[in-house]
Image (tube, rainbow, N blue to C red):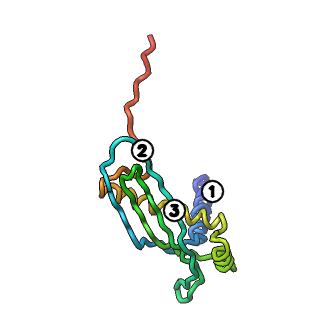
């Protein structure tokens, strides 16, 4: 019984650390604003699929969180899956809301206005969120218009048995 009591606080600490990570997450909103999908031809032969994300704009915004309004940024993005040779296209446009710490919001906005760049750590977090949400949506849209999936899916293959030893 003493061993179980010693393990219990460790589990609580892990859960507490996990909750802290969730609270520190700075992406507070995500929405799609436009879907465009078109199948121009039947998929046959060798097909190329290129996925791309472009951050179209970054704007300052006030986000109501509780009783106060927090300064944040609205990232407008476009995700495109282009099927070649001229088979089809899936375009997804959307917005992502981001809250920074301290002067991070104004610093990011200044850098965006100056050079259309965002710090790497912030951009990595934003692009990963966009990729996760858009890849899932593009997968559903591709199925609906009979295009191949824009991301590789796991396949089950028959495995040959090794030759029996004699």
Of labels 3 and 1, the one closer to you: 3
Q: Position of residue 60 (x, y in %)?
A: 58, 82
Query: Label 2 vs label 3: CA separation?
Result: 23 Å
Residue that badge 2 annotates: 154
Q: Residue at x 42, y 71 (%)?
A: 32
Q: Is residue 91 rendered to the left or right of residue 1?
A: left
Residue that badge 3 annotates: 53
Q: Nearer the viewer, residue 108 or 129?
A: 108
Which secondary structure, mark 2?
loop
Q: Quadrant of residue 91?
A: bottom left
Q: Nearer the viewer, residue 47 or 68?
A: 47
Tell me the number on the disc at residue 6: 1
Q: Residue at x 56, y 68 (%)?
A: 22
Farthest residue, direction top: 166
- Badge 3: how crowded within 10 Å, few (<14), some, or many (20+)? some
Q: Earlier in the sequence, mark 1 or mark 2?
A: 1
Which secondary structure, mark 1?
helix
Query: Label 3 vs label 1: CA separation?
Result: 48 Å
Of labels 2 and 3, the one closer to you: 3
Q: Are marks 2 and 3 in contact (CB under 8 Å)?
A: no
- Badge 2: how crowded within 10 Å, few (<14), some, or many (20+)? few
């Amino acid at each position: 019984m003493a061993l179980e009591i010693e393990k219990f606080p460790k589990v609580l600490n892990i859960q507490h650390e996990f909750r802290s990570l969730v609270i520190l997450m700075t992406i507070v909103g995500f929405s799609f604003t436009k879907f465009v999908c078109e199948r121009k031809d039947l998929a046959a032969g060798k097909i190329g699929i290129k996925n791309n994300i472009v951050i179209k704009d970054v704007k300052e915004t006030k986000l109501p969180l509780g009783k106060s309004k927090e300064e944040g940024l609205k990232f407008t993005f476009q995700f495109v899956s282009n099927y070649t040779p001229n088979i089809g296209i899936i375009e997804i446009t959307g917005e992502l809301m981001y809250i920074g710490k301290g002067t991070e919001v104004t610093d990011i906005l200044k850098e965006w206005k100056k050079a259309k760049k965002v710090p790497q750590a912030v951009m990595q977090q934003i692009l990963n969120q966009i990729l996760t949400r858009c890849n899932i949506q593009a997968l559903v849209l591709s199925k609906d218009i009979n295009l191949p999936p824009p991301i590789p899916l796991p396949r089950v293959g028959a495995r040959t048995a090794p030759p029996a030893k004699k």
